[in-house]
Image (cartoon, grey):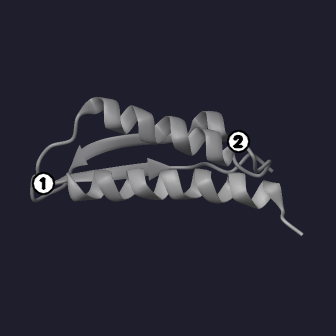
Amino acid sequence: MLNLGSLFRKKSKDVAKQRLMLVLSYERQGLPPSMVDKLKEDLISLFSKYPQFDAAGIDVSLKKNEDEREELWISIPFKGS
């Protein structure tokens, strides 16, 4: 029997994975701010399905490390106990 729920989850997961790979591949070339925003939207949509996460508190940003290289930072908080 076909489980329609698994089809939708897989699609969402695959889209998020594809976008994350795109973000990582452009790390050295500079990333348009709209891509970071879209990634954040996708993560909020994905983690909203799980009650243990605070999807509204998700933070996605590009930061420079000690070597002045850009890094992608993703923070996905748990809900308070």
Q: Is residue 73 left or right of residue 76?
A: left
Seen as rendered, the residue at the extreme front is 1
- Label 2 – label 1 distance at C-alpha: 31 Å
- Measured as percent of width and height from the top left, residue 47 is found at 66, 47
Secondary structure type for disc 1: loop
Q: Residue at x 11, y 49 (%)?
A: 29
Q: Residue at x 40, y 50 (%)?
A: 19
- Measured as percent of width and height from the top left, residue 60 is found at 42, 42
Q: Which of the 4 image quadrants contains residue 2?
A: bottom right
Residue type at numbered disc 1: Arg
Q: Out of 49 and 77, give the one closest to the viewer.
A: 49
Q: Is residue 10 left or right of residue 20?
A: right
Q: Is residue 55 left or right of residue 79?
A: left
Q: Which of the 4 image quadrants contains residue 20?
A: bottom left
Q: Is residue 64 left or right of residue 21?
A: left
Q: Out of 33 and 70, give the one closest to the viewer.
A: 33
Q: Quadrant of the N terminus?
A: bottom right
Q: Residue at x 50, y 51 (%)?
A: 15
Secondary structure type for disc 2: loop
Q: Which residue is mark 2?
A: 48
Q: Which residue is mark 1?
A: 28
Q: Residue at x 47, y 38 (%)?
A: 40
Q: Are marks 2 and 1 in contact (CB under 8 Å)?
A: no
Residue type at numbered disc 2: Ser
Q: Is residue 17 above or below residue 46?
A: below
Q: Is residue 25 above or below residue 43?
A: below
Q: Earlier in the sequence, mark 2 or mark 1?
A: 1
- Measured as percent of width and height from the top left, residue 54 is found at 68, 42
Q: Residues within 10 Å of mark 2 (few under 14, many from 20)?
A: some
Check residue 4 in the rendering and tell me which mark sits there, or answer none.
none
- Measured as percent of width and height from the top left, residue 63 is found at 25, 45
